[in-house]
Image (cartoon, grey):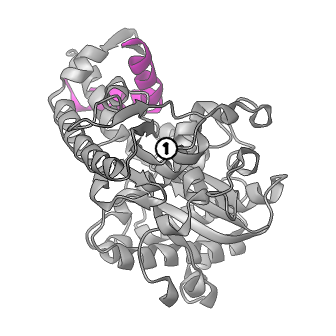
């Protein structure tokens, strides 16, 4: 049996999943394999921290990179915004730029080098997870998920495909197994990979993130759905996609730059507003640095209970959902997303009526899916009526199987893109000339 692996290298976490050929038409939950990329580290085994940090003569990855950056305070940063680099209008120029001094004090590495090194770490984790999985067999197709935000997506795909190719060469040379590698060895491996034939001939397919999430929702929930609309609220982007059978409605595809990271900044600014005694820039930066590692937990509490509490020294900072939702920037994001979603929903409603379907399934996935305004959004009626919209939870019953040790269900909304990307039929892959690949 041949298998397909899809990699979702998210802004906060990277995820991957494997599915056998034909999984879309012959769905079997037991053969859908979310991959344990972080099996030996702390945190959830299915989520691998997207981070790289230069620490003197070593380069650190994942959770180790984040810890080292936190220990350095506000003076140093880990590189986490890989998608920010890859979404630059001039991609080649962005990749060839030197990493800022806060990331690489010696300014010795290009941003391309750091992206390739992280992808080498990630691909190594994927390959180890595949090898240790008791079900997955030979992998003959590789895919990655991407936001649908570029007009030059074919050219950009070729560049990203080459980055993955170089990453495989680098990974084979370095064997990154413990979240770190010697900087000198990394530089040598990078230099060798640039002209390696294996890097130039490596091939992957690309699937849009929200399309993949919709594919997952269409087949993995309790009843298979034919007409599905999905809102994928990730860390870096919010994406909308709609499916009618195995066909994506291109007119319903939307990507917004505001997402989980944007909401984190709203929350951090709310904390600053609640702390008027922190007047200096240094004091405010200290609060930001202290809240940064905890902001996602605070956001979860805010969305679940309407309140969040953060202790900063002797102070107790109380945060409320009402204040969060009154933020001017947040209101603009909510308005933009609502407008985009209802436009996509109308397009799917028109297609459903033409197909003589009586209902549409709406699902929210991604780390921001639990937000109250997102849950309210997917319950919206279709503009023009005539078709019922059924909002479904994003977590299928099979995600609670004992084999996953209770680890999959809590993060399933974040795995939906990788899972859907692995099982999606070829018709859902991004359009480009594969014959010339």
Displayed quadrant of residue 170: bottom right
Image quadrant where one finds the N terminus: bottom right
321 shown above or below 376: above
Residue topped by disc 1:
69
Q: The magenta stretch spans which residues?
A: 278-306
> Any magenta on residue 214?
no
Q: Which residue is painted at 23% across and 22% down in the image? A: 325
251 shown above or below 170: above
> Any magenta on residue 287?
yes
* Left or right of 70, for residue 28: right
* Left or right of 280, for residue 240: right
Q: Which of 139 and 30 is in front in this view?
A: 30
In terms of secondary structure, where does tag 1 sit? Answer: helix
Q: Which of 143 and 241 is in front in this view?
A: 241
Residue 254 at what x, y percent from top left?
29, 53
436 shown above or below 357: below
Residue 192 at what x, y percent from top left?
60, 84
């Amino acid at each position: 049996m041949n298998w397909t692996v899809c990699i979702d290298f998210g802004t906060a976490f990277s995820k991957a999943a494997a599915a056998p050929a034909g999984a879309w038409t012959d769905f079997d939950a037991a053969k859908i394999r979310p991959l344990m990329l972080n099996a030996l580290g702390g945190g959830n085994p299915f989520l691998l921290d997207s981070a790289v940090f230069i620490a003197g003569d070593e380069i650190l990855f994942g959770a180790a990179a984040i810890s080292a950056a936190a220990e350095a305070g506000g003076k140093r940063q880990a590189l986490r915004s890989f998608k920010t680099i890859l979404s630059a209008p001039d991609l080649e120029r962005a990749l060839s730029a030197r990493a800022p001094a806060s990331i690489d004090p010696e300014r010795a590495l290009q941003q391309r080098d750091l992206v390739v090194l992280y992808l080498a770490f990630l691909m190594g984790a994927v390959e180890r997870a595949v090898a240790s999985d008791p079900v997955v067999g030979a992998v003959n197709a590789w895919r990655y998920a991407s936001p649908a935000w570029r007009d030059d997506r074919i050219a950009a795909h070729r560049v990203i495909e080459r980055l993955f190719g170089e990453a495989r060469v680098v990974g084979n040379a370095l064997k990154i197994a413990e979240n770190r590698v010697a900087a000198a060895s990394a530089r040598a491996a990078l230099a060798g990979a640039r002209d390696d034939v294996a890097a130039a001939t490596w091939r992957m397919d690309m699937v849009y993130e929200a399309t993949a999430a919709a594919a997952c929702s269409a087949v993995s929930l309790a009843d298979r759905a034919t007409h599905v609309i999905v809102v994928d609220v990730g860390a870096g982007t919010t994406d909308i996609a709609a499916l009618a059978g195995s066909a994506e409605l291109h007119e319903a595809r939307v990507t917004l730059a505001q997402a989980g990271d944007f909401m984190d900044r709203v929350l951090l600014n709310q904390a600053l507003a609640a702390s008027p005694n922190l007047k200096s820039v240094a004091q405010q930066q200290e609060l930001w640095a202290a809240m940064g590692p905890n902001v996602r937990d605070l956001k979860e509490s805010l969305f679940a209970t309407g309140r969040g509490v953060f202790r900063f020294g002797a102070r107790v900072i109380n945060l409320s959902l009402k204040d969060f939702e009154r933020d001017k920037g947040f209101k603009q994001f909510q308005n933009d997303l609502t407008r985009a979603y209802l436009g996509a929903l109308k397009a799917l409603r028109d297609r459903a009526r033409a197909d003589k379907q009586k209902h549409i399934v709406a699902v929210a996935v991604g780390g921001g899916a639990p937000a109250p305004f997102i849950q309210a959004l997917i319950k919206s009626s279709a503009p023009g009526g005539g078709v019922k919209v059924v909002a479904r939870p994003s977590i299928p019953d099979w995600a609670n199987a004992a084999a996953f040790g209770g680890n999959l269900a809590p993060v399933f909304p974040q795995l939906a893109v990788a899972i859907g990307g692995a099982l999606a039929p070829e018709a859902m892959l991004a359009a480009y000339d594969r014959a010339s690949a």
